[in-house]
Image: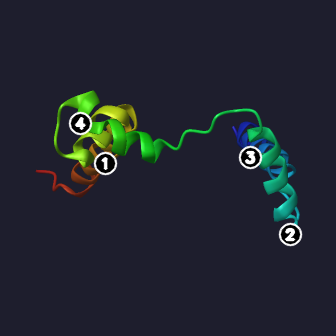
């Protein structure tokens, strides 16, 4: 059992080192911005916020723009957040309830 735990910790540590190896060095933020700027050349950039403002009513026929963004455009993300909140609440209730003897 202890060997499995050490293996999992070593694998996690290796993944963290691998992920950190691609981070930019301190003070090299301009170089990263330039790389990103070069990737955007030749591609039409559409700002999602501008699209939401321009098409919210037309896409969903709802006058409340917040409802359109959360309910239509980002519905799967919102569903995931709600599942996390409800699961945390259920676990809290199960852990804190008093058991009858």
* Mark 2 crowdedness (10 Å alpha carbons): few <14, some 14-19, many ≥20: few
Q: Residue furthest bottom?
A: 27
Residue named by callout 4? 57
At a point 84% along the width and 48% down the height, the residue shown is 35
Q: CA distance from mark 2 to mark 3?
A: 28 Å
- Residue 85 is labelled as 1
Q: Nearer the viewer, residue 19 or 87?
A: 19
Kindly report which numbered mark, 3 or 1, lies closer to the viewer in this rendering.
1
- Count of numbered tags: 4
> N-terminal of the two: label 4 or label 1?
4
Q: Residue furthest top?
A: 59
Kindly report which numbered mark, 4 or 3, lies closer to the viewer in this rendering.
4
- Residue 26 is labelled as 2
> N-terminal of the two: label 4 or label 3?
3
Position of residue 44 measured from the top left corner of the image (x, y, whole percent): 64, 34
> N-terminal of the two: label 2 or label 1?
2
Q: Secondary structure at mark 1?
A: helix
Q: Secondary structure at mark 2?
A: loop
At a point 26% along the width and 48% down the height, the residue shown is 66
> N-terminal of the two: label 2 or label 4?
2
> N-terminal of the two: label 3 or label 1?
3
Q: CA distance from mark 4 to mark 3?
A: 50 Å
From this viewpoint, is residue 20 visible? yes
* Mark 1 crowdedness (10 Å alpha carbons): few <14, some 14-19, many ≥20: few
**Are the residues tagged 2 and 3 within 8 Å (C-beta)?**
no
Q: CA distance from mark 3 to mark 1?
A: 28 Å
Q: CA distance from mark 2 to mark 4?
A: 44 Å
Residue named by callout 3? 9
* Mark 4 crowdedness (10 Å alpha carbons): few <14, some 14-19, many ≥20: some
| As drawn, 29 above or below 46 | below
At a point 18% along the width and 46% down the height, the residue shown is 64
């Amino acid at each position: 059992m202890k060997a499995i735990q050490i293996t999992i910790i070593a694998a996690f540590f290796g993944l963290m080192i691998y992920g950190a190896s691609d981070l930019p060095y301190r003070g090299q933020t301009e170089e990263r911005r330039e790389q990103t700027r070069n990737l955007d050349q030749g591609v039409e950039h559409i700002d999602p916020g501008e699209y939401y403002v321009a098409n919210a009513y037309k896409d969903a026929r709802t006058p409340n723009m917040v409802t359109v963004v959360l309910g239509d455009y980002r519905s799967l993300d919102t569903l995931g957040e709600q599942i996390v909140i409800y699961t945390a609440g259920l676990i809290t209730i199960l852990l804190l309830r008093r058991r009858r003897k």
